Amino acid sequence: MDVNVANYERIVFFTGAGMSAESGVPTYRGAGGIWKEYDYLTYACQDAFDRDPSAVWDFHNYRRELVGQCQPNLGHKLIAACEKNYPAMTIVTQNIDGLHQLAGSNSVIELHGSLWRVRDERIGVRKTTRDSPFDAQQSNGSFWRPDIVWFGDMLDEAVLSDAVRVISNCDLFVSIGTSAVVYPAAQLPLLAKDAGALCIEINPEETPLSSLYDLTLRTAASTALEQLCS
Ligand code: NAD
């Protein structure tokens, strides 16, 4: 099947950790996955933060340092270029690395928050900072919390409903580099299918959702995007 984004109007790129693999950002699962080295119960859940915010911040500052050295890859750039030609294009990402925005994309729904945002729930404040390391302890002794959806957290309702709205209305849905095992994000492709969109999966490996797709491209993100966006 020969597909080109030029033949579609309402395009959704649904991206996961594999989108940023070519930029050098480690995925969570698979070869080199970060959870092989770090136990998320110690570093990436609310209980861990309540117990030992400094340890959680050591891990997140380590991630800031690693990701801060990474640049958008060709795939991020091709998607950003697409946005200029197709205003009704949206990126729904599970990534927290901010690389789509760094590549120049504006229309980005971040399902799982951002490594570059912090929040203080007591005073209802969020802020963006690329400080690395970020000094998370405030003068009153309390800690800023990474504005990330950790294991066990609910997704932000407004963010999820934005994602549901655009996916339910798209005519082309392109899933890129997600293992399709993290819920509720993994259910979102079903909405595109129900909407009658053409559904494409880009992933070198098969996933639990592969059979849903009209077309599967078993190759790296940038290679497949060169094919779709040229
Ligand atoms: P995952 O780690 O579970 O799966 C990554 C998927 O990407 C795998 O299926 C793998 O086969 C595929 N992949 C690897 N290299 C690829 C490439 N070059 N091109 C295309 N696909 C490739 O990631 P997930 O499904 O996104 O779920 C993990 C959760 O952890 C999500 O919330 C995710 O955003 C988060 N996470 C984010 C980052 C990031 O911000 N870059 C990194 C790691 C994990």
Image (cartoon, rainbow, N blue to C red):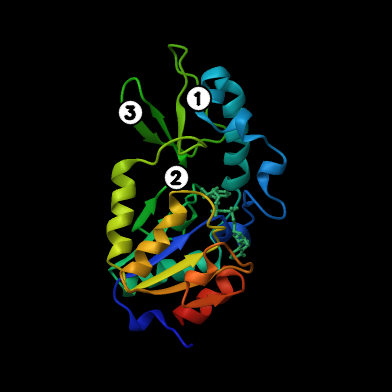
Does the residue tagged 2 have its C-beta within 8 Å of any atom of ligand 1? yes
Question: Residue at 28% of width from left, 69% of height from top?
Answer: 87
Comparing 214 with 26, the one in front is 214
Question: Residue at 72% of width from left, 40% of height from top?
Answer: 37
Q: Quadrant of residue 189?
A: bottom left
Distance (Cα) linking label 1 and label 3:
14 Å
Q: Secondary structure at mark 1?
A: loop
Number of numbered discs present?
Answer: 3
Question: Residue at 44% of width from left, 45% of height from top?
Answer: 112
Q: Which residue is mark 1?
A: 136
Comparing 211 with 71, the one in front is 211
Distance (Cα) linking label 3 and label 2:
18 Å
Image height of 15 relative to 3, above or below:
above
Confirm or deny contact between disc 2 and disc 1 (CB under 8 A).
Answer: no
Q: Could you say where residue 54 lies in the image, as x and y percent from the top left? A: 58, 21
Q: Which residue is mark 2?
A: 112
Distance (Cα) linking label 2 and label 1:
20 Å
Question: Residue at 51% of width from left, 81% of height from top?
Answer: 227
Q: Quadrant of ligand 1?
A: bottom right
Q: Which residue is mark 3?
A: 125
Q: Could you say where residue 104 lies in the image, as x and y percent from the top left? A: 41, 60
Q: Could you say where residue 66 lies in the image, as x and y percent from the top left? A: 63, 44
Amino acid on which the number 1 mark rests in the picture: Ala
Amino acid on which the number 3 mark rests in the picture: Val
Q: How many other residues sit within 10 Å of disc 1, few (<14), some (14-19) or many (≥20)?
A: some
For this orientation, the residue located farthest to the top is: 140
Q: Could you say where residue 43 lies in the image, as x and y percent from the top left? A: 60, 31
Question: Sequence-wise, which precedes: disc 3 or disc 2?
Answer: 2
Disc 3 versus disc 2: nearer the observer: 2
